[in-house]
Image (tube, grey):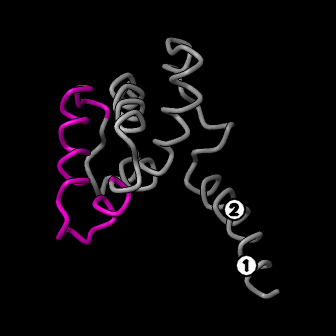
Amino acid sequence: MRKAHICLALPALGLISLGACGGGPSAPNRSVQNLDANQIGVGASLSAACAGCHSHSSGAIVSLADYSEAHLIERLNWYKADVSGTTVMHRLARGYTEADIASIARHLSTQERPE
């Protein structure tokens, strides 16, 4: 029974942490107007995990705003294929399908760098 309580709490904790990273619905994103519904639904949802480290404001890890869709696909596939890799990027990439990677790359490549 204890496992059931933990499993129910994990999605709620994920939503709380997403809001803390500024990835919630109130976060400004001017480029959303230029995306079709499929890109917003899938690409934006999946790339929310990227924003925790690769946001414009974090400064710790490079922003992904200036990368092309092709480059992002190449790099995500590299992380996915590297079976000996143990970083967060390796672990995240292994969980994505080819379609997921394409959606993430499409969404991230359309993001504008804040002025």
Q: Is residue 85 left or right of residue 7?
A: left
| Residue at 30% in and 58% down | 89
The circle on residue 11 is 2
The kind of residue tagged 2 is Pro
Q: Is residue 108 left or right of residue 11?
A: left
The kind of residue tagged 1 is Ile
- Residues 52 and 28: in front is 52
| Residue at 23% in and 31% down | 67
* Rendered-image quadrant of the C terminus: top left
Residue 53 at what x, y percent from top left?
A: 38, 55
Q: Is residue 19 left or right of residue 77?
A: right
Chain part drawn in magenta: 65-93
Task: Determine which quarter of the picture holds residue 72.
Answer: top left
Residue matched to label 1:
6
How far is the residue under mark 1 from the one under mark 2? 9 Å
Q: SS at mark 2?
A: helix
Dot 1 surroundings within 10 Å: few (below 14), some, or many (20 or more)?
few
| Residue at 19% in and 65% down | 83
Q: Is residue 109 left or right of residue 71?
A: right
Q: SS at mark 1?
A: helix
Residue 24 at what x, y percent from top left?
A: 65, 44
Decide which of tag 1 and tag 2 comes sooner along the chain: 1
Residue 112 at what x, y percent from top left?
A: 38, 24
Dot 2 surroundings within 10 Å: few (below 14), some, or many (20 or more)?
few
